[in-house]
Amino acid sequence: MLVSYKWLQEYLDLSQISPKELGDKMSVTGIEVEGITYPSEGLKKIVVGEVVECVPHPDSDHLSICQVNIGEEELSQIVCGAPNVKAGIKVIVALPNSRIAGNVKIKKGKMRGQVSNGMICSLQEIGYSDSVIPKEYAEGIQYLPQDAIPGEEVFKYLEMDDAIIELSITPNRADALSIRGVAYEVGAIYNQKPQFSKTTLVEVPRVAADKINVRVADENDAPAYQIRIIENVKIAPSPQWLQNRLMNEGIRPINNVVDITNYILLLFGQPLHAFDYDKLGSQEILVRRGHEGEELVTLDGETRKLTPENIVITNGTTPVALAGTMGGLDSEITESTTTVALEAALFDGLSIRKTSRQFNLRSESSARFEKGINQADVGLACDMAASMMAELAGGEVLAGAVVGSEVHPENAVVSITLDHINRSLGTSLRTADVNQVFEALAFPYLEEAGTYTVSVPPRRWDIHIPADLLEEVARIYGYDKLPTTLPSGETVAASLTADQAKTRALRSTLEGAGLTEAISYALTTEEKSQSFTWQDSQLTRLDWPMTEERAVLRLNLISGLLDDVAYNISRKNQNLAFYEIGRVFHQENDPKHDLPQEEKHLALALTGEMLTKDWQTASVKVDFFAVKGILQNVFAKFGIEDQISYAKSNLKDLHPGRSAAIFLGEEQIGFVGQVHPNVAKAYDIPETYVAEVNLAALLQAEVAPLVYKTVSKFPAVKRDIALLVADTVTNQELMAVIKASAGKYLTDITLFDVYQGQNIEAGHKSMAYSLTFVDPEATLTDETINKVMDKVTKALTEKLNAVIR
């Protein structure tokens, strides 16, 4: 919400309060100030000029030579390229050695051989955004009012000598989405009562009800709805003061009628909509729900397909506007409009939110309907707008507002005691102190024996319970005045649970391996949530996500880590090793009635180099075995490495030849492998390896007791064996057969060579193992070892069709 400091000054005495001081005070009383900008800051020597003479440039078909009165004895010649420059207008002139937007310095020079003493400026060139410049001046220079005095600074004519305060409004303080609401807030801070001018609405004898009939099908959709008719309006640009006010608030001026509705929106926080009465096609307005299959072309030219979730304004049969969101193109105000049907309403905020989300139409109006508006000012805002249309557009306001539904809000009555206030805030406030707060807020109250009964006006619809009043007392009295106290009581020594201790040790293991912890969002997109999952699960969706990027709860951690990898890669961080410990959310039954099951997972993501090149070591890139090795260390840390096995992975998001499923006993608990090249391309990342395991399953796994053995005093014997097997046979299968057949003396197996290529039959591979044998009670003989190796050889040959080399 942008707030004009000069506009506030019309209702409050801020003569002794600077914009910065006001911003600081508001920030410490509950409404955060994002920043304060001064439109004229950085601009220098920008004055009013009057174009006395304008002739075409002799050597250019788009330039003009202008003689401009800048308040000096002689006219100043300026060459201008604007298509709308002409004699007799007042313009913005940047003098020689002036500064315009972007800290650009304007110098005296020549253009196509003609002297140019400065520059005639557009609004863009003095700092205005394209989005707020009036349509008529979007491609040219701005005309200033005819009463502007040549030679004077332009800032006061455009209200650039203002300070614009940007407020960050929380959902509970939607009352501050209006200038009047902010005025009440500032008045409470400085113990002033805002002074608003009263609206005098002059109506003509003709009755509006004779021109239109208004009906509301369901008053839950539109608790308040009324139409006023203004005839004989003349559509024209708004006066400069109104255009200035809208531009400073970030709104583009359109024409006098539309600008008035936007002005009232800012002043009251009450959205209004103006229809061209003659284009409605009937003398009836019906507010109802949309019908399936109905269509409406909105003001942006888009055709919207309506549903029963949409509240629509119709001419009795055909939709002419999306309630609270956007008007229809066929009934918009144009230069030919002579009769205006002015709508003021209160719509169901939930329905407006659904509609704006459905059509991706977020507007100042929809935001206010969603958060709430002051129900007591619906009629007053409409009357003031009608009065302004009579004044600024020459219209005649027909007698009476035609009402389809209306509300009669009453003050909310909330009670609180002085003891409760002091006990909660830790203060020693007296009755006089609390009285002063409620008087500053302009809340009528009754105090009896320390009990306050407070009457809260409808403009503060966020206050319902004693805690709300408590907050008001605290912030108006001053958070900085509240006493600071330390917690009291006894402390009890805490300890980690077994799972917490194991998780902490896991973090140490991973960080010792060179990984860095990452924390990703638990909310993601449907596509990302369903990737990298080995379990079937329904999605858990949010009913009202803030963005489509955060719409469902995640089913995996990898997609979040890949986002982190992509973020770093785009910033030239090439060697990355991340891990994350977090929860995923599985949903087996109906997501609307059952809560998701939270499951703690561990995920890894590595890319780039494991070891960087230096003067004595070559660089080593991350590969499948590096990630698998980290996992093996993790399993060893948990004491379950003997229970872990690997099998071929069928995950479509992983490289089919560089991935594996991980099993704990008979249950799959995760996977490890390279991200599929197509997925990596979608994330715009290089070759990346990932792994994810069910950490909850690791924590709950039964661990065999640790048995200590003495070091044998007898020597170990090593034997190597090389065998030729089909390339579909895994190392895990080979080692399982060797262990099963080698007997009790086998203490270690190491794979030291894998070879495929020349002299090896296609579809086969050579695997070489080193086997270590130890007898703790005697020295092993060659005869014993030979018998064991024979058993191993026979088992490999029979079970896996291995050929001993």
Image: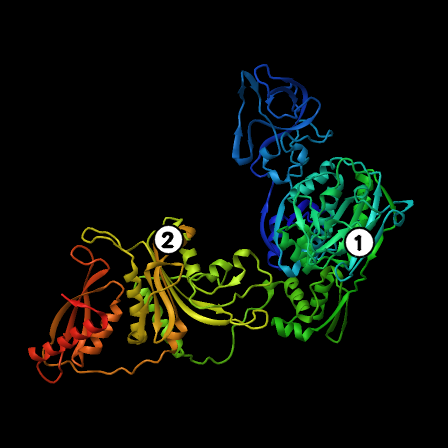
517 to 204, vertically: above or below: below
Tell me the element at label 1. strand
Q: Residue furthest bottom?
A: 777
668 to 170, vertically: above or below: below
Counting other residues with Cα less than 10 Å from the Cα at mark 1, is it few (<14), some (14-19), or many (20 or more)? many
53 to 664, vertically: above or below: above
Query: Residue 706 or 258: which is nearer the viewer?
Result: 706
Quarter of image, res 89: top right
Judged left or right of residue 688, residue 336 is right
Where residue 363 sits: x, y (%)?
Answer: 65, 50
Counting other residues with Cα less than 10 Å from the Cα at mark 2, is it few (<14), some (14-19), or many (20 or more)? some
Where residue 323 sits: x, y (%)?
Answer: 72, 53
Could you tell me the amino acid type at mark 2? Pro
Tell me the element at label 2. helix
- Quickly name the residue at label 2: 677
Query: Residue 657 or 683: which is nearer the viewer?
Result: 657
Query: Residue 36 or 178: which is nearer the viewer?
Result: 178
Judged left or right of residue 224, residue 683 is left
Q: Residue at x 81, y 59 (%)?
A: 406
Where residue 794 sits: x, y (%)?
Answer: 17, 74
- Residue 123 badge: none
Sequence-wise, the earlier of marks 1 and 2 is: 1
Where residue 622 sits: x, y (%)?
Answer: 29, 57
- Quickly name the residue at label 1: 286
705 to 261, vertically: above or below: below
